[in-house]
Image: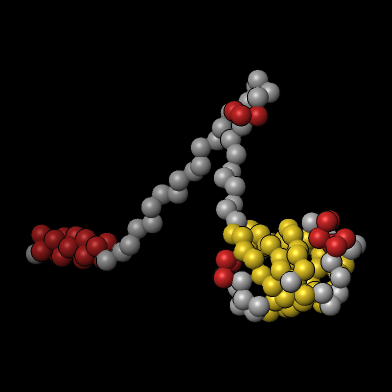
Amino acid sequence: MKHALILSAGLAVALAACGQKTEPAPVEAPTAAPATTGDMAAMPMAPAEAGKSGVGSGVITAVDAAAGSVTIDHGPIPGVGWPAMTMSFKAVPAVVAKAKVGERVQFDVTVRGRESEVTAIRPE
């Protein structure tokens, strides 16, 4: 009788363990020793986030020189996967200086993550 009870208890524990999922042990990122030579090539660096570029066309609706931005009511921009919309963009200083409200333009835009920047505008 004792053997049957011990065997039943062992079997119950084994069956209970079979249905449980186990989490893999966390893997820690290796730490790099600091460069002692002053050579930046030896420093570990995160990979640069790849950006997308596209060309759009639209009408400039606002220019904010202090913020370094332009707002454009633009059509779809397939190169970056955007539908038509009105949005504010960061812009390089040359674009901000050249942009005029109400002007219809073609523009180059670069997108990295959630950041977008107009790098050039041309009259349309």
**In the picture shown, does residue 73 fall above or below 15?**
below
Q: Indicate the quadrant containing the N terminus: top left, top right, bottom left or bottom right.
A: bottom left
Position above or below: 108 against 82: above
117 relative to 80 in the view: left or right: right
Q: In the current view of this chain or complex, which residue is farthest to the top?
A: 37
Residue 123 position, x and y percent, is: 77, 68
| Quarter assignment of residue 42 | top right
- Residue 109 occupies which quadrant of the picture? bottom right
Residue 117: percent from left, percent from top: 72, 61
Q: Which of 45 and 34 is in front in this view?
A: 45
Image point (65%, 24%), residue name = 39
Residue 94 higher or lower than 87, as above or below: above
Q: Which residue is at the front of the view, 33 or 105?
A: 105
Residue found at x 60% / y 39%: 45
Using residue 104 as the reference point, say whether residue 75 is left or right of it: left
Determine whether 29 is above or below 83 in the image.
above
Residue extending furthest toward the front = 124
Residue at left 59%, top 66%? 80
- Image quarter hosting the C terminus: bottom right
Let me know if residue 41 appears in the view. yes
Q: Nearer the viewer, residue 30 or 84?
A: 84
User: Between residues 41 and 28, which one lies in front from this camera angle?
Assistant: 41
What number of labels is visible?
Answer: 0
x then y, percent, for residue 41: 61, 29
Residue furthest out toward the right: 66
Place of residue 3 in the rendered image (x, y in percent of width and height, measured from the top left): 10, 59
Q: Can residue 67 be seen in this view?
A: no
